Amino acid sequence: MCGIIGYTGPRPAASVLIDGLKRLEYRGYDSAGLAVVAGGRIQQAKAVGKVKALEEAVAGSGALGSLVGCGIAHTRWATHGVPSEVNAHPHFDESGNFAIVHNGIVENYQELRRHLEARGCHFRSQTDSEVLAHLIAGAYEGDLLSATAAALEQVSGTYGLAVVSRHHPGMLVVARKGSPIVIGLGKNENFVASDIAPLLPYTREVIYLNDGDIAAVTAETIDLRNIKNVPVEREVAKIDWDAGVAEKGNFPHFMLKEIFEQPETIENAIRGRIDHEMGTALLNGMNLTARELAQITRIVIAGCGSSMHAGLVGEYYFEDIAGISTSVEQAAEFRYRNPIIEPNTLVIPISQSGETADTIAAVREAAAKGALITALCNVVGSTIAREAGRGIYLHAGPEISVASTKAFTSQVVVLLLYALLLGRNRRLNRADGNELACEIEAVPGLIRQVLKQAPKIREIAQRYAHCDDFFYIGRGCLYPTALEGALKLKEISYIHAEGYHAAELKHGPISLLDERHPVMALANDIPGKDKIIGNIQECRARKSPVVAVITEGDDSVRAFTDDVIEIPACSRFIAPLPTTVALQLFAYYIAVERGCEIDQPRNLAKSVTVE
Ligand code: M6R
């Protein structure tokens, strides 16, 4: 949550910062601000709302837009204090000589604030972050890096921090603990940011800070230390994403672009990972021998939101295909529940961003209990990917829209590959393994067929866009698919939507059903369909309109529904993938019809880096 960008070099700083904030806006978008050090002073601009408002403020502020120097900027998702100009970052110390932008939470800020106020500091904002500017100014004795380190020693909580000072033109100081900071390496210029998205137009070479690292960055130099002021070395990593993949192109929204990218993103997730000769999957990033795989007796999957839903689909795969007892935990629950991890338990954290606070904590809890951990992440070099040590990247490219689409389907495909590998490692024979491998390879084609139906799905969506409530029901692997479909609808269209196991309706929720409560029934022609037909009839008997996802050409459900979305025929393991794509399109077109802010829904942010 919240995005940071910093720049030092010969370009006009504000334009690099604003361009960077636009690419970071998906991390938070209730207010934004920047500060530029040039000509012996720090100049700033802030605005409530989107980065566009900040851009206009800078344009209206005279010279600020063209100043050459160094600067920091921030786009905010409010935690402490309402979205307002005073609460927007950067924050300043009393003298105005130091400015900071901060991601994370200063947990002891009230105590620190009381001490600082007693020493005569005046606070302007309600944020926890402002204490950092005052602490740095208080610790300053001529060295900005040391002052920042001394300030951070007093802080408990998390931070991704960038600092500038009037006393050090051309210098950015950054520090990381629990909230990512990456340094982008340029020629005669350098960048700092909270993730790589804003760096893509300028460089492919980056240094990821580790927790406890602090660095002074100028256009020519990088002085990297740990918090105890001891120099440390970090690898320079190469990024293979290009800037174009983080742009909308001809699509009206990132979400639609990302929905339509899914045939390719799934091809990328599968590429090089199928061994037809052995009828198995090749997942080298896991670095586990066949013997080590054979010793796994239990799997625990941890994640949040869509990533948890992908895990719930994976639960069916691991149990059904590999015969390994599997459970899925909401990551926050896992971290606080003192989970039981036996010697041969495999923990699979799933996270698109790799920066979700609760999932990071779950990884640490699992590591502390000695679990074998293999993470599924999309963002290369993210905290979870690095802390887990072993894992499988999704290769979905940057996912910008807050609603997860292509990352979810890649997670499901990678879980299926993982189950294939574990299945072959125990009870699946080569022919059955190969059959599943061929089904997996056919997924991009199935998704292309669903995408061709976008105009028809749009028409159906328009008929339901006025609704206030929606139920989604499914069975088997389509039960978590129903949860994911309902999540998509509620987060982008603000329609209250509930996902239920179809059998659960009768245990309470059916009391709500009437003509104002439509039901989306996932009635694909896979085992469980007959039962779903019964459930659909129960809904119809209560006058609920029913939209059903069915298998192409299957007329057995059509008679009981108001509208159908047809999915190409596929097995029960594959069905969640094309079905999810249809549900994504349905949610998207409803949100379009309702005029919603699709890529940046209210109150949300792309990565949830606080508990
Ligand atoms: O980056 P992660 O996969 O860890 O994020 C987890 C959730 O925050 C995320 O899936 C969220 O639920 C999405 N907005 C769903 O569309």
Image: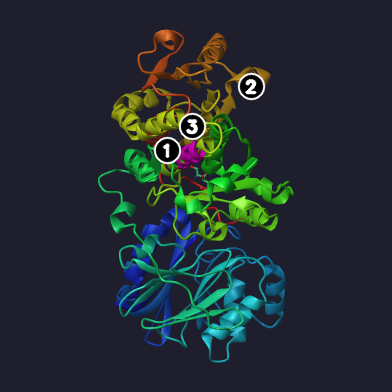
- Name the foreground residue: 42 vs 107: 107
- Give the residue drawn at x 70%, y 54%: 369
Residue 428 in the figure: left or right of residue 459: right
Q: Where residue 278 is drawn, which disc sits there?
A: 1
Q: Is residue 60 visible?
A: no
Vertical placement of 88 versus 377: above or below? below
Give neighbour class at mark 3: few <14, some 14-19, many 20+ (Cα, 10 Å).
many
Q: Nearer the viewer, mark 1 or mark 3?
A: 1
Q: Amino acid at mark 1?
A: Met
Q: Is residue 302 visible?
A: yes
How far is mark 1 from mark 3, CA to CA? 35 Å
* Residue 420 among those drawn in magenta: yes
Q: Amino acid at mark 3?
A: Gly
Extent of the magenta region? 411-421
| Secondary structure type for disc 1 | loop
- Give the residue drawn at x 65%, y 40%: 297
- Name the foreground residue: 423 vs 539: 423
How far is mark 3 from mark 2, CA to CA? 17 Å
Vertical placement of 329 versus 185: above or below? above
* Residue 368 among those drawn in magenta: no
Residue picked out by circle 3: 485
Residue 190 in the figure: left or right of residue 159: left
How far is mark 1 from mark 2, CA to CA? 41 Å
| Secondary structure type for disc 2 | helix
Residue picked out by circle 2: 504
